[in-house]
Amino acid sequence: MASSSCSTSMLHRGSFNSKQIKNCNKELTFNHSSFCCKSLDHCKSLSATTDIKPSRLLLLNEKSMKWKQTPKFSLKNSVQCRALEIENKPSFTIGRKFQLGDVIEAQQFDRDTLSAIFDVAREMEKIEKNSPGSQILKGYIMATLFYEPSTRTRLSFESAMKRLGGEVLTTENAREFSSAAKGETLEDSIRTVEGYSDIIVMRHFESGSAKRAAATANIPIINAGDGPGQHPTQALLDVYTIEREIGKLDGIKVGLVGDLANGRTVRSLAYLLAKYQDVKIYFVSPEVVKMKDDIKEYLTSKGAEWEETSDLMEVASKCDVLYQTRIQRERFGERIDLYEEARGKYIMDRDILRVMQKHAVVMHPLPRLDEITVDVDADPRAAYFRQAKNGLYIRMALLKLLLVGW
Amino acid sequence: MASSSCSTSMLHRGSFNSKQIKNCNKELTFNHSSFCCKSLDHCKSLSATTDIKPSRLLLLNEKSMKWKQTPKFSLKNSVQCRALEIENKPSFTIGRKFQLGDVIEAQQFDRDTLSAIFDVAREMEKIEKNSPGSQILKGYIMATLFYEPSTRTRLSFESAMKRLGGEVLTTENAREFSSAAKGETLEDSIRTVEGYSDIIVMRHFESGSAKRAAATANIPIINAGDGPGQHPTQALLDVYTIEREIGKLDGIKVGLVGDLANGRTVRSLAYLLAKYQDVKIYFVSPEVVKMKDDIKEYLTSKGAEWEETSDLMEVASKCDVLYQTRIQRERFGERIDLYEEARGKYIMDRDILRVMQKHAVVMHPLPRLDEITVDVDADPRAAYFRQAKNGLYIRMALLKLLLVGW
Amino acid sequence: MASSSCSTSMLHRGSFNSKQIKNCNKELTFNHSSFCCKSLDHCKSLSATTDIKPSRLLLLNEKSMKWKQTPKFSLKNSVQCRALEIENKPSFTIGRKFQLGDVIEAQQFDRDTLSAIFDVAREMEKIEKNSPGSQILKGYIMATLFYEPSTRTRLSFESAMKRLGGEVLTTENAREFSSAAKGETLEDSIRTVEGYSDIIVMRHFESGSAKRAAATANIPIINAGDGPGQHPTQALLDVYTIEREIGKLDGIKVGLVGDLANGRTVRSLAYLLAKYQDVKIYFVSPEVVKMKDDIKEYLTSKGAEWEETSDLMEVASKCDVLYQTRIQRERFGERIDLYEEARGKYIMDRDILRVMQKHAVVMHPLPRLDEITVDVDADPRAAYFRQAKNGLYIRMALLKLLLVGW
């Protein structure tokens, strides 16, 4: 009955409207009310205490639909609702399952998941350019729980949510979250904030805190960086940018330049690139900040070729992608001499552009200091601002997938 | 004419849409334009200089409808509009007046007002769960003017406003409100901010500041805590939680545990409970932070039974509600020895649960440190996270009542 | 085809809906897709490298419509779309061009532009009072990039955007913008933020930074104050307030009182008043903070009369507008004696009101300390809070003009 009412309304609308799922679900709620838990929180504690990973999306839909019920019914319901969405996205395989529950670390993504996310991200580009005022996430609230400030990342997520019609609750300095200051655990803070929102984007100064939050929360958690740990959405937007700019991921040659020892970004990128065929990676860095062995061994184990060199010019002439990073002074402590030596060593300027191939691009996670000279910006191959913009599309895609699914 | 056009459109819509009031009102504006003040501010200064408390709601509707006119017309109009809403809420008595103008202190609420607010709060629970994207407060702006940070309270109010389709202006650190820093009075700041918003939620470090703000403002003020003074919405959500969890308020037995001397929360709660019949309150606290005599005397004067005891186990076995609070170190100054002794004295753990009745619940205003052990959380009787969530419903209810009335 | 579909829908709606422009434009996008650039960013770099000032509005519409195309087509399109709006605003001359691209400094406005902005501001007053929930800017995102806090100005802009249905991204303390802290240039920050928003309102501590931002950005920039430099929206709301309160600008007598040497506000105001006929300005200030010669010479060159006097009473009796300002202690450094002498010299109190004409008004940019006594507030001639409110209307007008044009 729900599905029929939905498919009918389908005929009357061009673009998919997430409220329809909620309407179906609402009717279902009444139909199956006898199966609904009496208390939302009993449901939650239940689902929280059982391993629900295999059907996490279902649980998510359940949540995103604000509908509490027993698993077998959420299965039934989610199938109906996915079907609904497929009517609108014939490009997607019917019944395809998308097992994304939280976004915690780059390692969680396989090739299929990446290409699925990238499909949605491309769809998001169209929405952002041609249908301002999209209402796909109308009625959803995202909480940005930032325990350390990161304006760039925060704005990117908040813009993504608002571009899809969603609302945002902001805590730019959750470290002084009165409760946290008073000694409340992260778990208790999450339990409180999840009562006010539908998804939490968290940045924290402690490695592993995103995992802890996800283990507690009954709504999706997106890791927006946890200290020295992970920053998975940056890794996703980097790979997405390479595919958008070069047109492929298999068989590409990528030069990673700068601080490879401490750069969270380049480590995750190398990790994800290893999932593709015939990838060749060049490491170009000052002696003191060379890429660590764990990544090198991982690449070898995956059959990805890699080479360490100090000849930036030669790498520039061969690569599809030159990925430059900032040498972070704070990593050198007292040894300012080493810092000065390191940062001056590999600068990207017009001389580098001259030897690069026409189709190749320069990338950078930003912010940049002088490791890429300003006169490079005007060259079409300077992709770093497009790369930053791609962060918006990737985050729009993740928010859509986690909140309303396909 | 306005009313007819409204009732007609009524037939075509399931849920009440606050914009209709605005439309009626808009037409009325034209009809009676000759009666409208020339300048909004002359109106304001007028209403500000006359005691408008008896008809404060009318004035509020007038304001919330952004419609400036002479009192006798606002009466006529508000009756029509209340009528409209009653069509949609048959549960409410026709013509019932709701005299809530500002939310300043727990003392302002009588039993009827409380039960009226709780009726709306239950309605809000349905809205939050089943109709995401509610537009009841579409077009209204709430300013959160926080002179000291309180992320938990701020997020709860902002979520409430957004769940009803309203917009929010945030000042998380109004203490550094450039103007305040330059020596501007609270009154001047309020006069400025009220020009940008429809309702102000204020948190301040000075007791009594909310009253001062309300005396100045021509839009509703909600006190979100003024220093050692009041935090009325916390008191409301506590009583609401007891009614939701236990199913009644008359005849309940409540144990207040922990810091009863300084706890703003337990003092307000005791105050409100005294409004109900045959209530029994147990005070369980370390010697140094006992409940003060003013509350004890007030309870006695209202015929509420109370008892002071040190036997938490026995209280736990008798109570419907065990309300635990945090012992705040900052209250003990140098006497850390006293603090350590006090905080260790009454911990709630699984032993307490064992003696509690099946239907009883454990409450806590949060944040909690170790005064409730984590292994209690999984028990269905642990109500403190549901209690935090109830804060959302109470604040949704207050925002609806203050901005669009019934 | 676009225009027809729009004009039809026109018949069915009372108020103008900006989404229609976007819909037209969307269809046009498909019609002319062959003319669209492949990459948004190539477009941007292109437009950024060519002098597009003459057709800046067109470029803006192009941008605000999220539609990338070759100039000649944006001309065609913008004409159609302006036509659409004219259907709804017959008061505006058909085909009239509005060449406002960024709002950087008071000097950029001529009489015509000022009166055009004021026309729209009056329209905004109606919208704010009678049609809450306006959707004129639905689907647009404004980023408030504040490198120094200014809650009053920020709230005013954010309220303006929300009153028109737009969304806001806030950075109240962009100075600690992690990237800026790490040494990122303002230009790079702007390039990133413009990817997440449709317009940037910037406050900065450095004079000239707004110009730099506008030179970089491909979306409109509004200067919300750049250090000792400009604060154009304050100047606009001051002139708008005089016109609203006195009913004219030609032939008015204005007394500028207080710190005329450092007051950014009074300097810009004097500058703009010089554009009107037969204006007479009185400078009343302590010796140490007299109006500087550059402004005096400018007024003389424009044929505006001015006079320097120490007799506030006489000025008060002659003026249409008494504009009081705060003596800023920080300007006096060590010389607290001079500060104390200066601030006490010209206080506005009820004695001043007694000699002022019935139609005259007292203005103040706020915040005020004791340079205007509180007992003046109740007098209808105290215009400073209405003046603050006018800031909202002016900012609504600018946002509408910059994002959707007439």
Image (cartoon, coloured by chain):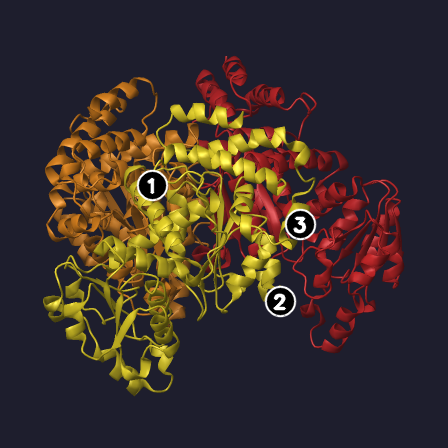
Chain colours: A red, B orange, C yellow
| Viewer-side residue, C4 vs A45 | C4
Which residue lies at the image location 52% right of the left edge and 38% below the top edge? C78
For label 1, the residue is B140
Q: Place residue B9 in its image quadrant.
A: top left
Q: Look at the image and tell me whether residue B13 can be seen.
A: yes
Q: Are marks 3 and 1 in contact (CB under 8 Å)?
A: no
Instruction: Give the residue type that dot 1 points to.
Output: Tyr
Instruction: Give the residue type that dot 3 points to.
Output: Leu
- Give the chain letter at badge 2: C
| Viewer-side residue, C238 vs A105 | C238
Q: Do the residues labelled 2 and 3 touch (CB within 8 Å)?
A: no
Q: How far apart are marks 3 and 1 (CA)?
A: 41 Å
Between label 2 and label 3, give the one nearer the viewer.
3
Numbered badge on residue C46? 3
From the top left corner, tell me how far across and down residue B105 is, in percent: 23, 50
Which residue lies at the image location 44% right of the left edge and 45% below the top edge? B351
Horizontal side, residue A245 vs residue A354: left or right: left
Instruction: Give the residue type that dot 2 points to.
Output: Gly
Between label 3 and label 1, give the one nearer the viewer.
3
